Amino acid sequence: MYQIDLPEGKKVYFASDFHLGSPSFEESRKREDLIVEWLEEVRKDAAHIFLIGDIFDFWFEFKTVIPKGFIRFQGKLAEITDSGIPVTIFTGNHDMWLFDYFPTELGVQLLREPTDFKIGNHQFHIGHGDGLGPGDYTYKILKKIFANKICQWLFGFLHPNIGIGIATAWSQSSRKKNHFKDEGFVAKEREWIWTYCTEEEAKKHHDFYVFGHRHLPLDLEVNESAKYLNTGAWFSDNSFGVYDGTDLHLEFYKKELIK
């Protein structure tokens, strides 16, 4: 378990599913500029910033090559960590091929699985959210293949123009097929990440469960002493989570700018 102290007046921020690179260069750049603006604003009172997956619509690090673009976002992260504010990134299903570039060059902590944190006086369980809960067996098999070291090594032999081109096309197709946002919220019992939270709560108590992946801002009770918050997506809601030492809640950044 990781321990994060929360000085008086400081907050912890959570965001996910920026999907930078999608659906077009122009729209991604607008979103990137807004995210950089948001990061600059929250750093004023941030004790820690969590970016919990699918930051990019696709990312793969070759040994000496990374996808071009997103330089303003990367520069802002480096500026924030250089100033002494910790940033933790969880890999998502679209950017699970983040390796050592972000920790080495940008000074962020990189995590791949749901992880326990004690932040202030509260217990947190944090992750991206893909492959959790019941069902979705096809993806769970695919995730094991994509996470396999041999498969990653073989993919790394492709020329970046070919490898990134193939993977970007697949990533965009996969995202369109899921239609997370269009499905909307029906009932918490139909939310499979919520089901995962109830199962985890039965094993060990956490005050707050924080995930992304769902592309829908959610603030749901797990039981009388625990809740699950989903940070939503920045192509649809500009939503993020804020923990102030007392409670965890959702906020929205300039949502009126979303078309």
Image (cartoon, rainbow, N blue to C red):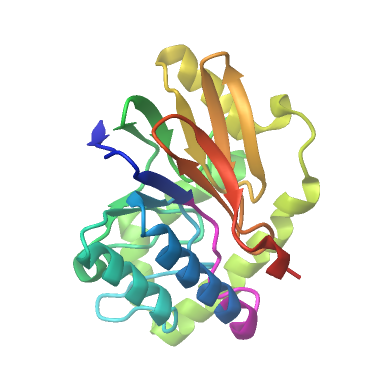
Look at the magenta stretch and give its main secondary structure.
loop
Query: Residue at 34% of width from left, 68% of height from top?
Result: 154
Q: Is residue 24 magenta?
A: yes
| Image-based side of 10 in relation to 249, left or right | left
Q: Which residues are magenta?
A: 15-28
- The front one of 182 and 171 is 182
Residue 29 in view, yes or no: yes
Quadrant location of the N terminus? top left
Query: Residue at 59% of width from left, 59% of height from top?
Result: 253
- The front one of 79 and 223 is 79
Q: How many marks?
A: 0
In the image, farthest residue toward the front: 9
Residue 252 in which image quadrant: bottom right
Residue 134 in view, yes or no: no
Q: Is residue 192 above or below residue 65?
A: above
Q: Is residue 19 magenta?
A: yes
Q: Is residue 145 above or below residue 34?
A: above
Query: Residue at 39% of width from left, 84% of height from top?
Result: 159
